[in-house]
Image (cartoon, coloured by chain):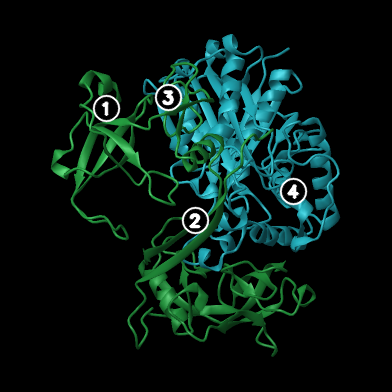
Amino acid sequence: MNRDVAIVAFGQTGHRRACDELSEVEMLMPVLHEVLAATGLKTSDIGFTCSGSSDYLAGRAFSFTMALDGVGAWPPISESHVEMDGAWALYEAWVKLQTGDADTALVYAYGKSSPGSVRDVLTRQLDPYYVAPLWPDSVALAALQAQALIDAGETDEPALAGVAARSRDAAHANSHAQLRGPVPHGDYLVRPLRTGDCPPIGDGAAAVVLAAGERARELCGRPAWIRGVDHRIEPHGLGVRDLTDSPSTRLAAERAGAFVRPVDTAELHAPFTSQEVVLCRALRLGDDVTVNPSGGALAANPVMAAGLIRLGEAAARIHRGTSDRALAHATSGPCLQQNLVAVLEGDPR
Amino acid sequence: METEFEVLRAPLVVEFPFTRSLGPVQSAFLTGLRERTVLGVRTTDGKVLVPPVEYDPATADELRDLVEVAPTGTVTTWAWNPEPRRGQPLATPFAWVLVRLDGADTALLHALDAPGPDAVRTGMRVRIRWAAERTGAITDIACLEPETEKGPQTPRQVSAHSGVFEGEAAVAGIIAHARLDYTYSPGRAQSQYIHALSGRRTVGERCPACRKVYVPPRGACPTCGVATEEQVEVGPRGTVTTFCIVNIKARNLDIDVPYVYAHIALDGADLALHARIAGIPYDQVRMGLRVEPVWSEDARFPDHYRPTGEPDADYDTYKELL
């Protein structure tokens, strides 16, 4: 029997191409303060703290321990970190709350891509024997997936441009987004993907607060209850997978209960336009579902935080009453290798 | 956001060679590439995986049944790369391809040398171009190239292979070089600290909640979790709170051993920083010793600290800083 756990607060930075004047903890701290202030909680009230980040992005060893300075980890707190997108930190926190060990959790994630070259940095997560020595960058791998999708007749370049335009148009309403409004679709970065099909590169952070049961109702007018959450991974070999499909997303969605009843909103972590096509198909999302009203990762993609932001954006719509049942998705690895799906609901109005 | 200080920037190169050992299947595959032979591995349900893996991605069965496949194959998807990046297989524009070699059921990632995107399509026939010098690595395949002669269109029969090759010893490991280039910026608090140091001043920051002064400042009070912004000049003198005697000479460091490395609480600071102590025999350094910084000509930080000659500090004045 699951405990009822909800996202009760969400905050994010204004995502920018670069924030050189701030260290990671300086960038993160205002977001932590924002979610604590929204719930009236202090660090000492929080039962469990979990974060997601990668030192490789900015090249700063142990940056996640420095980031803890912004939490105020004294007296010693119950804390954990994943070298993954913050969505997986949220999953760990959700499990912790399920055990009954904690009633509240602070989850945060941050990524500064500006100091390095994120396309090259991400090659270091690949199979070190057969793939990483070739330095295939993240855009190249996504482009192989996009071409496979085009060859299969699932999309074409104009349709992909349509995904890009719709996302950045939606981001008009999102003051945190890095790219808003019409963006030139641009030249091929790696064909068939043009600059417009790719996410902006930038720095940013996000945080959420989770709470269980009655505690959630005390802290939030309309908690975004996590009805189900699951994550699944596919083989790492790109040539083993069918890149036009995402069975791991579909299975995670099934396990999260996404197909029990329709959702009204979906926040999908699709850094590339072609990946949104794959995800919509895997999740069987109909035209009546509002996809990425925030603009999604095509409007702001702070690596390691962008997945957590999808959960936060979906929850925020429930908090505001603009959604009653939303699906949130996060991805990790090349070509949608690993996927997390959560189903969020608000209490009946 | 307004920036009231000069943002410091410096190049930072993170470079590391990983030495990785290989399992029996990976070893046979990479040894095979050195000998211009492509090996795959057969799964329990009869599929041939190229590149081969040690365990079945579907069933987790241990796989050891090696087979030889052809150096020719078919492109299953491609992507045209107009601007090759450092480390990639070709320096001129090329296509990334997934290629199913004849006899294999899965595809291998590599580069295809082609004159332009119009010369590439899914389904096209390609063959391996071997590197002139081969060491037992995936880069022993220099790239793929379009197959000019009409080869057999039907999958070639695979043949069993022992995985053993004549000649040099089997490849047991690889050294995976990695280099990432960054432009490092230390952020607001540390930038201001470094600026002050260039004027031979040590400036910490006070926590608005607990009033502690942190040196060097990192922008946040680690116990209160709030931003520290009030700047406080500390030192220059301080007290040794604890120390150790270093007996091992560090590489590239021109300091005679033994020497003393100490935690020093600068006057006015609530956090000890660490530095070398000199100007006193190593066996006379003690807790409570009063010290001051010694700046060398061009350095932007103190070279070391030396005794001031003052009486030792009372234990109670620094016991909270141990």
Count neighbours of disc 1 (C-alpha within 10 A) and say few if under 14, some if 14 to 19, many if 20 or more.
few
Q: Colour of chain A?
A: cyan
Compared across the picture, whether B23 is left or right of A4 comes to left
Pointer 3 local density, CA inside 10 Å: few below 14, some 14–19, many at least 20: many
Q: Are marks 4 and 2 on the same chain?
A: no
Badge nearest the viewer, 4 or 3: 3
Residue under pointer 2: B58
In the image, which disc is placed on residue B107?
none
Question: Dot 3 corresponds to which residue?
Answer: B213
Q: Earlier in the sequence, mark 3 or mark 2?
A: 2
What amino acid is found at the position of numbered circle 2 in the picture? Answer: Ala
Dot 2, how many residues are within 10 Å of its Cα: few (below 14), some (14-19), or many (20+)? few
Instruction: Name the tint of chain B in the rendering.
Output: green
Reading the image, the residue beneath label 1 is B322
Q: Which residue is mark 4?
A: A277
| Residues tagged by mark 1 and mark 2 found on one chain of the structure | yes
Secondary structure at numbered mark 3: strand
Label 1: chain letter: B
Dot 3: chain letter: B
Q: Are marks 1 and 3 in contact (CB under 8 Å)?
A: no
* Three-letter amino acid code at the position of disc 4: Val
State the CA–CA distance, disc 4 to disc 2.
Answer: 25 Å
> From mark 1 to mark 2, how far is it between C-alphas?
55 Å
